Amino acid sequence: MSHASVSLKLKQVAESTAAPLGTFFKTGPGDYAEHDQFIGVSVPNLRKLAKEFQHIGLDNIHVLLHSKINEERLFALIILTNRYAAEPDVIYQFYMDNIQQVNNWNLVDASAHLIVGKHLHKADKDILLTLANSTVMWERRVAIIATWYFIKMNEFEWTLKLAKILLTDSHDLIHKAVGWMLREMGKRDVEPLKTFLNQHAATMPRTMLRYAIEKFPEAERQHFLKRT
């Protein structure tokens, strides 16, 4: 099984499904996905094919991860997440060595919590501080999305810690990611979310706030929105 056979298979699936994946991304000049190409393979099909190619070598995964085609990079990341449990140290290190290729929101969101978050759950998490302070926007998103794994374990300290660091971030994709993680935290325990909002709602980006309070009753939503 080679990267060439994967590429051929994905193109065959794309020809038969023509899923307009690229319409969900900003691909214009200067936009965050300007570098990406899309061939139109749906995520369910990628996950199905990943089972067929689950034993492909890391050398071939490396080639796919460095492809200009978004679906090939996502395919590589799905395989890595599937194989993490069998070889956690190898997969985590491979991911971190190639983190510059985890460079769109769908790639980050499909992998960061399942590899970085899971790996760091019972380990030193200071690398998340480095990522959260990175000049690379995608690395900052990896940091906050990685905490989704902790949230699922009902552990919120690092989500709140990184959210504070990213309050002044200039990119809307970070505002959305932070707000999303705060909302996920609030689904499990709304009190730490309300404490965070009482401290920061007046100054946090409005998009971040809207995402965070999306599940609140309307009266509470308006209460926090009026504080901005």
Image (tube, grey):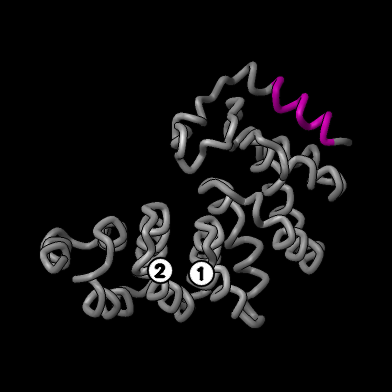
Q: Is residue 228 found left or right of 126 in the rendered image? A: left
Q: Residues within 10 Å of mark 1 (few under 14, many from 20)?
A: many
| Quadrant containing the C terminus in the rendered view | bottom left
- For marks 2 and 1 on the same chain, the one whose residue lies earlier in the sequence: 1
Residue 75 position by quadrant = top right
Residue 25 seen by the camera: no
**Which residue is at 49% across, 66% downward?**
144
Three-letter amino acid code at the position of disc 1: Ala
Q: Nearer the viewer, residue 43 or 2?
A: 2
Q: Nearer the viewer, residue 100 or 128?
A: 100
Q: Is residue 71 magenta?
A: no
Residue 216, horizontal then vertical, whole percent: 22, 62
Magenta stretch secondary structure, dominant: helix
**Which residue is at 50% across, 59% downward?**
141
Three-letter amino acid code at the position of disc 2: Leu
Residue 132 - label? 1
Residue 123, horizontal then vertical, whole percent: 66, 81
Residue 33, horizontal then vertical, whole percent: 51, 39
| Labels 2 and 1 touching (C-beta < 8 A) | yes
Q: Is residue 7 magenta?
A: yes
The residue indicated by pointer 2 is 166
Residue 45 seen by the camera: yes
Residue stretch in magenta:
3-12
Q: Is residue 42 above or below residue 201?
A: above
